[in-house]
Image (cartoon, rainbow, N blue to C red):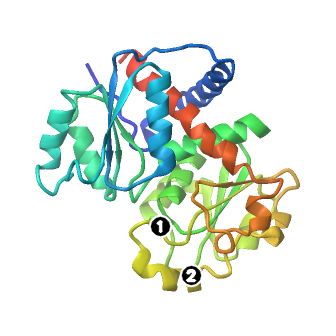
Amino acid sequence: MSVRHFLTLRDCSPRELEQLIARAMELKAMHYRRELYQPLQGRLMGMVFEKSSTRTRVSFEAAMAQFGGHAIFLSPRDTQLGRGEPIEDTARVLSRMVDVIMIRTYEHEKIERFAANSRVPVINALTDMYHPCQLLADIMTYVELRGSIRGRKVAWISDGNNMCHSYINAAVQFDFQLSIACPAGYDPSPAVVRAAADHVEIVRDPALAAANADLVVTDVWASMGQEDEQTARHQAFASFQVDAAIMARARPEALFMHCLPAHRGEEVSAEVIDGPASVVWQEAENRLHAQKALLEFLLTSPA
């Protein structure tokens, strides 16, 4: 039996991704109606964390609990992924004990090696290259509030980081235009950009990226593991804050998103993140519902 993994958005077809978003919205409605739906009774998820997170841990644990399953949290103290036992051996052992494995780590190569040796689905809950689960929640949020994102313009104003790479993948899979504004030296991977063909442009002016955008997205300037670059990054990104002037360049009905945690007064002004265009709290909640749809898809769909 073949095993489906979810390491990037490219692991699903555009049709499968659209079905995941639609199913996430159905599951959210069922949740609000307090309907008991437990398709994963007796199923176990192993959650391997090398990077800490509030939203990722709570959303995946809650998803398994609401589905009637159970999640086992493995902190950096509990496992040394690739530093003691080889990654391949860890994958072979864990995948004989649980039904699905979620990994939040640094190098993307680690999760690829793990998945290649796993007998069960592996979910990328964040690597240095990609954050596909967050994109499921982001697209779900947009669809809930504005309908299809196909043909829309999205402005990414931040570093060419893992979130940026996943937005590039999303631009192809969901068929929208992505305008990336970042300082020189902080561009996304050229290979990831090339694979997106004409869906992506890179500019140096955030106002240009935001012009007529339907969605404006940003992220912290220095992510976990980049603390030693913080001063240099703050200087480089000083003119890339998403503030009221930037949002005024977007369409009147444009939404603002941020994967959180956010630093008000740095990458985004308090006026924007706490203002009427911001949907960050709905976006954060939707991690739960989108991931439930993903778990159902990976664990109950025919191979």
Classify residue 299 as left or right of residue 154: left
Which residue has dot 2 on it? 234
Instruction: Check disc 1 and give the amino acid type.
Output: Ser
Q: What secondary structure is marked by label 1?
A: loop
Mark 2: few, some, or many residues within 10 Å (few <14, many ≥20)? some
Say if 16 sits above or below 248 in the image: above
Q: Is residue 296 visible?
A: yes
Query: At 47% across and 45% down in the image, what residue appears?
Result: 56
From the top left corner, tell me how far across and down residue 277 is, in percent: 80, 54
Instruction: Check disc 2 and give the amino acid type.
Output: His
Query: At 62% across and 40% down in the image, what residue appears?
Result: 285
Say if 162 sits above or below 140 in the image: below
- Which residue is the extreme one toward the right? 252
Question: Which disc, if any, is residue 16?
Answer: none
Query: At 46% across and 57% down in the image, what residue appears?
Result: 192
In primary-sequence order, the first of circles 1 and 2 is: 1
Q: Quick one: 55 or 95, which is closer to the camera?
A: 55
Classify residue 52 as left or right of residue 166: left
